[in-house]
Image (cartoon, grey):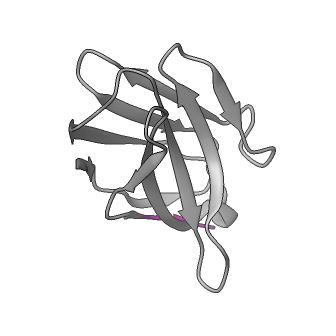
Amino acid sequence: QVQLVESAGGLVQAGGSLRLSCAASGSIFSINVMGWYRQAPGKQRELVATITTSGRTNYADSVKGRFTISRDNAKNTLYLQMNSLKPEDTAVYYCNLHNIANSLSYWGQGTQVTVSS
């Protein structure tokens, strides 16, 4: 089993910044992909960004140039730096870890990010 604990989100004005973190523990395989997803009210959960163990990143077009995903493998911690936030970034943000060897995927509990206009 893998446990993912996300930091608190928050309320921020448009144009502001926020940093999320996600601490992972448990059966974490050496080769994995971690990522952030989000779900806005009435919408499906969507990918925000992912990062592999080796540091390869992938971003949704809507956040490219504004969000930066990073990880500290020694601490099993994932980060998401969000800059130039927009009201449409308002959502519950979820941390995900996917173990490549056994194809199991785990989710955090989610953290609310609200961007006011």
How many callouts does the rendering have? 0
Question: Which residue lies at the image location 74% right of the left edge and 45% below the top edge?
Answer: 60
Residue 98 drawn at (x, y percent): 46, 42
* Residue furthest to the right: 61
- Front-lying residue, 102 or 17: 102
Question: Which residue lies at the image location 30% right of the left edge and 30% below the top edge?
Answer: 77
Question: Which residue lies at the image location 33% right of the left edge and 18% below the top edge?
Answer: 73
Does residue 3 lie above or below 26 as drawn?
A: below
Q: Quadrant of the C terminus?
A: bottom right
- Looking at the image, residue 22 sits to the left or right of residue 103; the answer is left
Does residue 49 lie above or below 47 as drawn?
A: above
- Looking at the image, residue 4 sits to the left or right of residue 114; the answer is left
Question: Which residue lies at the image location 48% right of the left edge and 25% below the top edge?
Answer: 70
Question: Residues in magenta?
Answer: 112-117
Residue 16 drawn at (x, y percent): 54, 46
Instruction: Answer with the quarter of the image where residue 79 lies.
Output: top left
* Residue furthest to the left: 26
- Looking at the image, residue 51 sits to the left or right of residue 22; the answer is right
Q: Main secondary structure of the magenta part?
A: strand
Residue 25 drawn at (x, y percent): 19, 38
- Looking at the image, residue 91 sits to the left or right of residue 108; the answer is right
* Residue furthest to the front: 102
Instruction: Answer with the quarter of the image where residue 97 lies.
Output: top left
Residue 53 drawn at (x, y percent): 47, 20
Q: Judge whether residue 64 is colored magenta.
A: no
